[in-house]
Image (cartoon, rainbow, N blue to C red):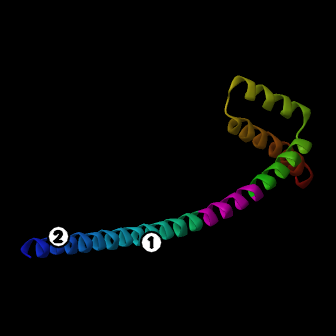
Amino acid sequence: MNGLRSQHKAQEHKSSSGASVVAIDNKIEQAMDLVKSHLMYAVREEVEVLKEQIKELIEKNSQLEQENTLLKTLASPEQLAQFQAQLQTGSPPSSSQSQGTTQQPAQPASQGSGPSA
């Protein structure tokens, strides 16, 4: 009879440890699901922010392309040639723009000061 009791207790121990393993597995799965849902929420939020930034950048790019087209139509052939030459030599375009803007106002200013004098 003692052998039967010890065998029964061993089976009880196995079944209770098996149940605790299942319970632990369930808790781990729940924790993983929670982490997954938080990550998915954070990713969705970040995607929305990035979509908005992309939209703004597309609009800005379109605006700059229109401005570029306008400036090309208003620029003289000499200014365009000078700009192309500076692009090919690797000179910074900002210096050509500053030179171009200082040359253009100087001409109207001399014309404007003539009639007023």
Q: Among all residues in the image, which is located at the extreme top?
A: 89
Q: Is residue 40 above or below residue 65?
A: below
Q: What's the magenta bit mostly, secondary-structure-wise?
A: helix
Between residues 75 and 5, which one lies in front from this camera angle?
5
State the count of labels: 2
Who's the residue at 21% across and 75% down the image? 12
| Residue 54 falls within the magenta-colored stretch | yes
Between residues 69 and 74, which one lies in front from this camera angle?
69
* Residue 10 numbered mark, or none: 2
Q: Quadrant of residue 6?
A: bottom left
| Residue 9 falls within the magenta-colored stretch | no
Q: Quadrant of residue 4?
A: bottom left
Q: Quadrant of residue 58?
A: bottom right
Who's the residue at 12% across and 76% down the image? 5
Q: Is residue 85 above or below residue 49?
A: above
Between residues 20 and 89, which one lies in front from this camera angle?
20
Neighbour class for label 1 at 10 Å: few (<14), some, many (≥20)? few
Neighbour class for label 2 at 10 Å: few (<14), some, many (≥20)? few
> Which amino acid type is marked by label 2?
Ala
Q: Is residue 57 above or below residue 71?
A: below
* Residue 58 numbered mark, or none: none
Who's the residue at 48% across and 66% down the image? 36
Residue that numbered label 1 is attached to: 34
Q: CA distance from mark 2 to mark 1?
A: 36 Å
Quadrant containing the N terminus is bottom left
